[in-house]
Image (spheres, helix red, strand yellow):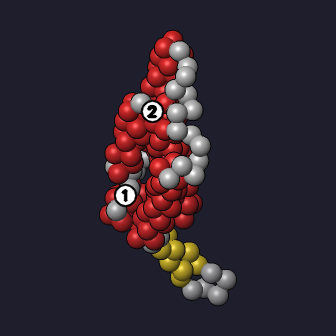
């Protein structure tokens, strides 16, 4: 996006949005979040965090309730990360001015990736706490979905240059 403005001396100022910088910042945030998930898993594997088998002694009914609650938490979290960002993009970001669009887009992208990172951590925590595979499956689902939330510079440009009136 390019916006022309005239400063107090009469010079034309072009406010350029650096799409590569936005994409790089989102990717760096994702890498830091992913590194924290990997650090959590490594610390659990090395028994630095005493989580292994924390919830193994619960009865079958409590385990079933935990599995169903986890399914709902992950489902709602994935929905919030994907559709919530879509809603914010069309109702908050695209109605703003050009430079504010870039800032809002970056902020909402960070929130979306943070939600997915929290779901990955939650899945890893449940895997080590219950010693059941279903916890890691939910974490892996959030991990796979997070790959689709990393925009390229062209993707950022396409999303920020959309017209909010033509989007549904």
- Report the residue at 57% width, 52% height from top: 48
Residue density around tag 1, few if under 14, some if 14–19, many if 20 or more, within 10 Å: many
Asked whether residue 109 is in view, the answer is no
Distance from Cα at disc 1 to Cα at disc 2: 35 Å
Q: Residue 132: x percent and y percent?
A: 42, 30
Residue density around tag 2, few if under 14, some if 14–19, many if 20 or more, within 10 Å: some
Identify the residue under disc 1. Answer: 151
Q: Residue 4: x percent and y percent?
A: 51, 73
- Of residues 79 and 154, the one drawn nearer to the viewer in this rendering: 79
View extreme (right): residue = 8
Mark carried by residue 97: none
The image shows residue 168, relative to residue 161, as above or below, that is above
- Report the residue at 48% width, 14% height from top: 60
- Report the residue at 67% width, 83% height from top: 8
Examine the image and state in which quarter residue 50 appears: top right
- Of residues 60 and 15, the one drawn nearer to the viewer in this rendering: 60
Left or right, residue 46 beside residue 140 = right
- Report the residue at 55% width, 60% height from top: 103
The image shows residue 102, relative to residue 53, as above or below, that is below
Quarter of the picture holding the C terminus: top left
Identify the residue under disc 2. Answer: 131
Left or right, residue 45 beside residue 150 = right
Quarter of the picture holding the N terminus: bottom left
- Of residues 168 and 4, the one drawn nearer to the viewer in this rendering: 168
- Of residues 168 and 47, the one drawn nearer to the viewer in this rendering: 47
View extreme (top): residue = 61
Left or right, residue 11 beside residue 156 = right
**Viewer-side label of 1, 2:** 2
Asked whether residue 23 is in view, the answer is yes
């Amino acid at each position: 996006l390019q916006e022309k403005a005239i400063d107090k001396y009469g010079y034309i100022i072009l406010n350029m949005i650096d799409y590569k910088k936005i994409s790089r910042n989102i990717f760096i945030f994702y890498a830091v979040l992913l590194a924290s998930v990997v650090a959590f898993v490594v610390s659990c594997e090395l028994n630095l965090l005493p989580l292994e088998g924390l919830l193994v002694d619960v009865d079958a009914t409590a385990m079933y309730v935990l599995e169903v609650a986890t399914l709902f938490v992950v489902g709602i979290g994935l929905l919030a990360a994907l559709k919530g960002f879509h809603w914010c993009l069309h109702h908050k970001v695209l109605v703003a001015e050009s430079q504010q669009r870039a800032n809002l887009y970056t902020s909402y992208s960070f929130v979306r990736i943070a939600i997915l990172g929290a779901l990955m951590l939650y899945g890893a925590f449940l895997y080590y706490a219950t010693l059941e595979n279903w916890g890691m499956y939910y974490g892996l689902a959030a991990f796979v979905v997070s790959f689709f939330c990393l925009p390229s510079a062209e993707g950022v440009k396409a999303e920020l240059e959309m017209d909010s009136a033509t989007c549904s």
